[in-house]
Amino acid sequence: MADLEKNIQYIKGVGPNRATLLNKLGIFSLKDLITYFPREYEDRGNAKKIAELVDGEESLIYAYPVGRINEVRIRKNLMISKLIVRDETGSMLVTWYNQSYLKNIFKPNVEYKFYGKISRKYGRPEMNSPVYEEKSLNKNTGKIIPIYPLTYNLSQNVIRKIIETGLEEVKNSLEETLPEYILKKYNLYDYNTAIHQIHFPESFEKFKLARNRLVFEELFSMQLALLSLKNRYEIKKQGIEFSKDAKMSEIIDKLPFKLTKAQLKVLEEIDKDMENSKPMNRLLQGDVGSGKTVVALISAYKAVKSGYQAVIMAPTAILATQHLESFNELLSDCNIKCELLISGISKKKKDDILKRLENGEIDILIGTHAVLEENVKFKNLGLVVTDEQHRFGVRQRSLIVEKGINPDVLVMTATPIPRTLALILYGDLDISIIDELPPNRKKIETYAVTKSMEERVNNFIAKNIEEGRQCYIVCPLVEENEEINAKSVMEIYENYKNKVFKQFRVEYLHGKMRPKEKDEIMDRFKNGDIDILVSTTVIEVGVNVPNSNIMVIQNAERFGLAQLHQLRGRVGRRRISILLHFKISRKFSNY
Amino acid sequence: MKVISQTNDGFIISEKDLELRGTGEFFGTKQHGIPEFKIANLFEDVSMLKQVQGIALEIIDKDPLLENKENILLRKLVDDKFKNRIEI
């Protein structure tokens, strides 16, 4: 049987260079390779007659060349090769750009296959840059061809060949992953067939069956895992009953602002959960700026006043620090001790915090992943709040939960997951939603503009900065490669600093920088010492810079809508009117 | 782009986004706890999701720790999930 863990490098036709490229796609082992599924398929199986060709469709035809290739030079760097081909129903024009080597390739009286997109001009069909080969061969055309999601420097042909080799190695020897009774009952393909047919389907029906089996397995194992997890929670049912005398209203009345109805409703749900003996497991969803942090604070207040400790886990040090600041401010005369635990603090300070945490002198601990460390021990942890849940995941959540005895758990997220989906994905959590923004928050104005308006956008930025405001420039994540992302940040930064905005203070921020550097830049931005901050999406997770009122998102088409929405939430968390620009630098019509 | 410049409601946006892009890109890159699917698409495969949820419930109900002989492979699937970056 083939070794599925075998390093990809040792598969025939791979070698160190291609291995590096494959690694970028997350392919390290033979197993990764054969489970790297096609993104789509091209049906090069069913040939059409020239007379049947439809404008805009990808089609396969069999045809004979008529005469030779005719080369037409349009301008210095553009040469078009034209070839007329015909079958018994009509003729078609085939064109290529700058491919002079084609000139003598096509032999008369030989039948070729052409596969490509049809455009019909003046009645006659045309095919531009088709895939072609002699009809008697059967390599690139003539079947359903998988198309893989790829990185540059790796072509479809190459990866197809490598995957073919990989499949050859495991040929029908893969262990079944689903029990026999399930395969039977739900009429699923066995694993070997599914894996083979998903890459090189013999027919569309077989592809569907293969996909069906693999999707089944993927979703099914996720559901099983979720349910197992939930089971684990429920086995230890006895949680904390927080005191009815620790009233949330005490702190609510002291707040310098009024809560929204939505916040109050959510707090009521949390209050009920906390007083109940069953451990709370609640997901709190709310848009950026909807006031989730204050809900966390009020919940923590109740926990502390009931005699327990609370921990707030944030995804970044900046956010944790910001939370600490607002907690200290709002809890100033409540006799509650808050501390910050992040990785950057000194050993001495850390030891001191750990000691006071363990003997109960600290009521609320706010921090990053650092709070998960083994030596972080609580005296009596009663409430766990994880902020922006998507950075943590279930495992971290359970790690922190283990630090108490069945503490209540509140998971906060700003990712607005559609409710139906949330119910399924978070089968283990109850859900609360804050669906209302505080009244003082102005609607964020959003403009989608094209690259051609860049100058106007820049003038607008300059005007705002002169009025004392600040601006974010967000560069897109090109791919999961920090180096490339950092580069795109640096390019824009250099251009701004040295040319476009040389009169202003421009700085940059990207994922390759040390946490300390990042924090320092964010601090300076917060303090108003930076006018324009060019950054990757590292700012994505809630940072309060009230004075920043413009965000320009470069190549906005590369972001998901939800992500754009979260990003723009970063501008102007306070009462300043807001403008947000998308620069669309290439044709983009999907939205 | 039209969607996002016209509404401030995150839920409307997320529904639309899911519809347009599928879950792979739905949560952007890198930063989410939603499982990254190799093949499933939560928008297209919602009915499958509901079906397997029912099946999983039934099985876990009868065999909470997946200890029955016939469920050995399922135990393994779950363990694998937890072993790898369990970002469920």
Image (spheres, coloured by chain):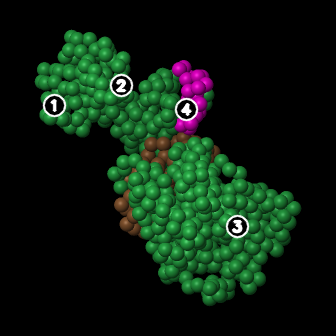
- Compared with A208, A249 (above or below) is below
Reading the chain from its start, which is encountered first: label 3 or label 1?
1
CA gap, disc 1 and disc 4: 42 Å
Residue type marked 1:
Arg
Q: Which residue is mark 4?
A: A22
Residue type marked 2:
Asn
Q: Which residue is mark 1?
A: A124
Dot in front, 3 or 2: 2
Q: Which residue is mark 3?
A: A321
Q: Which residue is mark 2?
A: A98
Tag 2–tag 1 contact (CB < 8 Å): no
The answer as to whether the residues below labels 3 and 4 share one chain is yes
Tag 1–tag 4 contact (CB < 8 Å): no
Q: Nearer the viewer, residue A312 or A70?
A: A70
Chain letter of the residue carrying label 3: A
Q: Position of residue A192 (x, y in %)?
A: 45, 30
Residue type marked 4:
Leu
Q: Position of residue A82 (x, y in %)?
A: 25, 23
Reading the chain from its start, which is encountered first: label 2 or label 1?
2
Reading the chain from its start, which is encountered first: label 1 or label 4?
4
The answer as to whether the residues below labels 4 and 2 share one chain is yes
